[in-house]
Image (cartoon, rainbow, N blue to C red):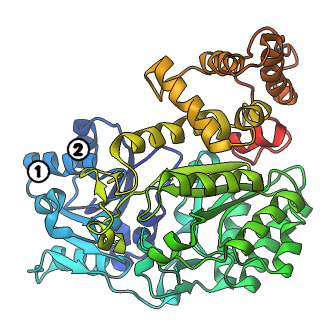
Amino acid sequence: MTILLATLNARYAHASLGLRYLLANMGTLKEQTALMEFVIGAKTTDVVERLLARAPSIVGFGVYIWNVEETARVVAMLKRVAPQVTVVLGGPEVSYETGQQEIVRLADYVVTGWGDVTFPKLCGEILHGPKPLMKVHAGVQPPMADIALPYSLYSDDDIAHRTIYVEASRGCPFKCEFCLSSLDKTAWPFGLDTFLAEMEDLYRRGARLYKFVDRTFNLNVKTSQRIMQFFLDKLAAAPGDPVYAHFELVPDHLPEALKETIARFPPGALQFEIGIQSFNPEVQALVSRRQDNVKAAANIRWLTEHSHAHLHVDLIAGLPGEDVDSFARGFDQLVALGPHEIQFGILKRLRGTPIIRHTEPYGMVYDPYPPYTVLATDRIDFSTMQRLVRFARYWDLVANSGRFAHTVEAILGEAPFANFMALSDWLYTRTDATHRIALERLAKLVQEWLQLRGMAPQAAAELLASDYAGQQNGQRADKPAAKASEPASAPAAPTAAPAAPARQARHLAA
């Protein structure tokens, strides 16, 4: 095998869309190109051994914020034991600030930005000459119609066991300074008929879970409706074999025609990821985020009340100009809107993003190592930021998991942020940990917290038991409901919507 395309995915379920695009567009080199995927945490020697077993002349690595450190170790070892192998890097993590990165120093070549055309051209020059003189090659953006779509390269095993990532468009017209998409000039759509034909083929092969990576899925309403109609048609034709689709939604753009389409989806078939990030207009203006907060809030409220879509809404702590009180107000406002999940994220300084311009004026201090999380600002000191980090983790365990749906309401009360922060601080004092907390122990701790806050022991136990009892429809018939006096173990996912991911299924059952 002459050329290997490789990456370390965050987990096995994440099949690399980027590498499949490269393979689909290799042209005359496609027959001598293969794809190898690994998972972060794999032993470096094992990865290098498996790569070299294919006897490649070129290895192209997809480099991302989550795998750059481990990929750097792989590249370093590969160049030591097989210096004759040419290493080419690509991906968002090495597309910017390339001169500052050790992994770039170790590699032979780097392709920045779009690689669909530039990577195959570079490989041809490496193999057949003339040998490229420049180390860094800026990716050429071809017309969208010239890009070969990669979906036939998902194997039957991928379709059966992994998330199928798809995109109807690339790019984004918005300029939010914390996002790499802020560097795009606009959004570029693929030919819709061609794209839907590929989706049809994936469905025919058994795909039932489609995750769209488009940054602005609902900007072109006619396109959005056609794509959603594709899934509605599948649901109507085979209601017993449901499909599930995930889209990233612009929060303040939800016209009536799109609402009518969304309202037709049954439970367990549709998820929206909605980026609010901040409700503070001054902070939004500071990071060049255009958002009508009134419309965004009204649309989220409509979705919770008039659709069956599962809502995953994002907030970012640590943005320049935002203090804890401002973030807390936004958090409380979002809780009141009732989304199923609030993804509480901490700001990261992605390489190349314009957010760097605020570093000195707003005292932004970032971790020098991936994922470059903000450690402190002029409004939030390091200690407080660490409390927010722990809040985010416990929020994921308790609220977003869907396992404590009724209990969370009692925890949050009339001051959601303040009350959950108090719980978070207490949990950390009791456990000195934010990971590897067994569900049974977590449930006991939550029950103890409720009692400390004045709830009677029996009432606290019954409240926790009601969460588990509400999810009994997915458990084995021989498994009894939890007793009021003891927390139950983790419930199994309901069977009513097998296409939906497990966490969403828990929310559906709550």
- The span from disc 2 to disc 1 (Cα, nearest Å) is 9 Å
Identify which amino acid the numbered label 2 is placed on: Val
Q: Are marks 2 and 1 in contact (CB under 8 Å)?
A: yes
Residue 169 screen position, x and y as percent: 57, 79
Element carrying mark 2: helix
Residue that badge 1 annotates? 82
Residue 39 screen position, x and y as percent: 40, 43
Q: Residue at x 9, y 58 (%)?
A: 84
Residue 252 screen position, x and y as percent: 70, 75
Residue 203 in the figure: left or right of residue 125: right
Name the disc covering residue 247, or none.
none
Which is more toward the observer, 251 or 169?
Answer: 251
User: With respect to residue 423, does 266 lie above or below?
Assistant: below
User: With respect to residue 76, does 449 lie above or below?
Assistant: above
Residue 486 in the figure: left or right of residue 11: right
Residue 110 in the figure: left or right of residue 458: left
Identify which amino acid the numbered label 1 is placed on: Ala
Residue 320 appears anywhere in the view: yes
Identify the image quadrant of the N terminus. Answer: bottom left
User: With respect to residue 424, does 508 lie above or below?
Assistant: below
Which quarter of the figure has residue 286? bottom left
User: Crowding at label 2, few (<14), some or many (≥20) Cα neighbours within 10 Å?
Assistant: some
Which is more toward the observer, 231 or 35?
Answer: 231
Choose the circle earlier in sequence order: 2 or 1: 2
Residue that badge 2 annotates? 48
